[in-house]
Each structure stands twice: as C-alpha cells, then as structure tokens.
Image (cartoon, rainbow, N blue to C red):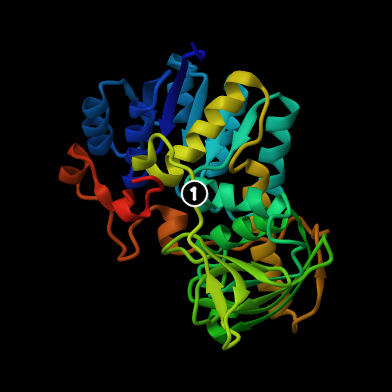
Amino acid sequence: MPEKLTAAIIGCGKLGQHYAETYSALPNVELVALAEFNDARRAVVARRFGVPGFKDAPEMFENIIPDVVATVLPGKYIYSAVMSAVQAGVRGISSDKPLGANLSEADEMVDACAANGIVFAGGNLQRAMYEIQEAASWVSNGDFGEIIGASVNGFAGEISGGGCQAISVLRLFTNAEVTEVTAWGHPEEALKGDSDSGLAIDGRFRLSSGIECSVFSESAVRGVDVWSEDSLVRWGWDPPISVFRGFDKHGSRIQLSPAFSSYEWGEYHYLGASIRSFLEVVRSGRGQLAVSGHDLRQALEVAIASKYSALWGSVPLRLPLPDRSLQLIPSRARWLGQDPNGSGQPIDEAHIRWDGYMPEKRHVAGK
C-alpha cells in the first residue's frame, strides 16, 4: 500500500475549504490540522473536518508537524507561511497562484525548499488537469509534428493571477521557457498602477525553443494555442482542450474528437490532479509535479516582465530579470483574500460544501 501521509491546510477561506474537501476524500492521506486567522471561520471549519484548528502557521507547527502542508492564503501572506513550513521541517509544501508579488521572495521560497529537500508544488492550476497533461504529452511525443508557433489569447484583467494559468500552460505545451518579453499595455491608469487589476497586455514572448509567441489582450478565443504545419492544440478554459488536424476544402481547420483517458477522482478536477501528483512525488521522491513552485515563480516573472516592458516603452526584457526586487501586486481579492466584490465568505457558508470550484460533469474526462 502507498505510504499514508498527514496533511494540514493553512488558510481556510473558500478555496482552502475546497483543499480540505479534496485531501479528506483522497486515499492514503489524513487531514490532521488547519490554520485560519478568522476565529469564527476557524472554529466552524475545524469542527466540520474534525481536526484541531490553530490561529496561524507558527502556532500549528508548535503542536503538529504534518508531512505536507497546503498554503491557501492571499498573496500577501504566502511567503511567511511557506518559510514557517520550511523551518518546521515538513516534507512537502504546496502554494497557490500567484506566488506573492515579489520576485526575490519567490526566489527565496523556491531556493529554501530545494536546499532543505522539500517538495515545493503549485496548487489549483489548470496546468494540472488530466486532459491538459495528456495533450501536452501528445505534443511532446511529436504526435502533431514540430511545434512552430504559439499564442496567448485574452491576456488581460489579472495577468499575475488568472494570467498565471495561461503562462503555465504555454510553458507546458511548448516545453520551453520564456526568455524575452516585449509588451504593450493599456489602459494607462492600470499600467501605471501598483496592481495588475484591469491591465491588458499585447506583445510577444520569445521562447527558449526559438518559437515566438504572440500575446493578445483581446481575442475571439481565450487561453493558449500551439500549432504545427497541419495541427493546432488549444486550451481555451471551457472546454479545456480542442484539437484540430488538417484542413477542409474551404481551408478551415478540421476539429478532432480526441479520446482522453478516464481518470479516478475526476470530481475534484484539476485540484485533485495537482494534489495527487504532489503526494506521489513526496512519497516516492521521483516523478514530475503537475505544477511546481518553480512553475509559479516563472509565471510571476513573465507577468512582471510584461508589466515593466510595457511601462518602460515596450522595451524587450530578457529573462531571468536581473532586478529581483521588481514586483506586481495582484488584484485586491487575490492579495488580501476578499471576494472580487470586496466581501468575505459568510460564516454560515463555511458549514457546508461550496460548489464554486466543482466542474460540471461535461468537463470531467470519462464522465
């Protein structure tokens, strides 16, 4: 039998509760603690999952050191929680997007985990989705021929939050790093602001593979396209994957109906896939994370480079950026933990399963 691991959640808002639900449902892992600063929510969620609740990460680690922890916090508080977990000596840490706002802190988290032999994983990113991982394996295996082009579509609104999804899928599909960013941004007030709220970016990403990826703030489709001479693979958020091969007599691409594999625990969608990958690497010390802390750091860096390239007159910026003090604060909701409308979760919602992160059945492979 696979080794049974213990897990704890740091941050029990809506998404943190979804993590707790997922960890509680998966086999060979036991949820043993949670940390939540809101007294009322902590009491409710701890009772709901039958585990002790603590005020914050340091208090939790004084009493319990689990094998793995998920830091499901607003961006402002991720760094301190991750470094507390490193100091506690856990075996694995996962975090969510974006990985804070500051490149130097992102570097420190990635480096500290590596130096201490701690698995550092990403969390609730579509990159982990089984269909995306499978499509990426087809691309990597050359099933569609040599990839010669790519585009990011709809890179606007929150380029370090939601945009983190697109950058992470782009890197996976192309098996390449972004090495240079040239960008234009609008509107001017968003470009000159501290956060990425309302910021729209157009431009070009140059990749380590030699591909030049066009970036569009507005597009008829949203997500990421990669293509070869006769094929196109598209991650478009909804549905997650479309595959085209060949052309009809009118010159239009012919859409295929690829046979994606059926997977266990599809109910928990890409978060379940991300957590399962994380737990397997912690157990075995082998394999590849569906989403890593490195992936989160790279996505943050591309977003920051996009903002500053545009702000500085569309100057090409080479990556890695030499100035690691550069930062991009995400939207208020992502930075401080409120809903987009500025309110927090009502406590009575914390008593029950919230289906906001649950996919519709038609989005689940094999269902």
Given residues 244 and 76, the one toward you in this image is: 244
Relative to 61, say whether 150 is above or below: below
Residue under circle 1? 260
Quadrant of res 178: bottom right
Q: Residue at x 60, y 86 (%)?
A: 251
Q: Residue at x 80, y 70 (%)?
A: 317
Left or right: 289 with respect to 19? right
Left or right: 206 with respect to 67? right
| Within-10-Å neighbours for mark 1: few <14, some 14–19, many 20+ | some
Q: Residue at x 38, y 41 (%)?
A: 266
Residue 220, x across and y down, in percent = 49, 82
Given residues 132 and 52, the one toward you in this image is: 132
Residue 49, x across and y down, in percent = 26, 26
Q: Residue furthest left?
A: 348
Relative to 115, say whether 193 is above or below: below
Relative to 58, say whether 307 is above or below: below
Q: Is residue 119 visible?
A: yes
Residue 367, x across and y down, in percent = 33, 46
Given residues 336 and 290, the one toward you in this image is: 290
Residue 27, x across and y down, in percent = 40, 22
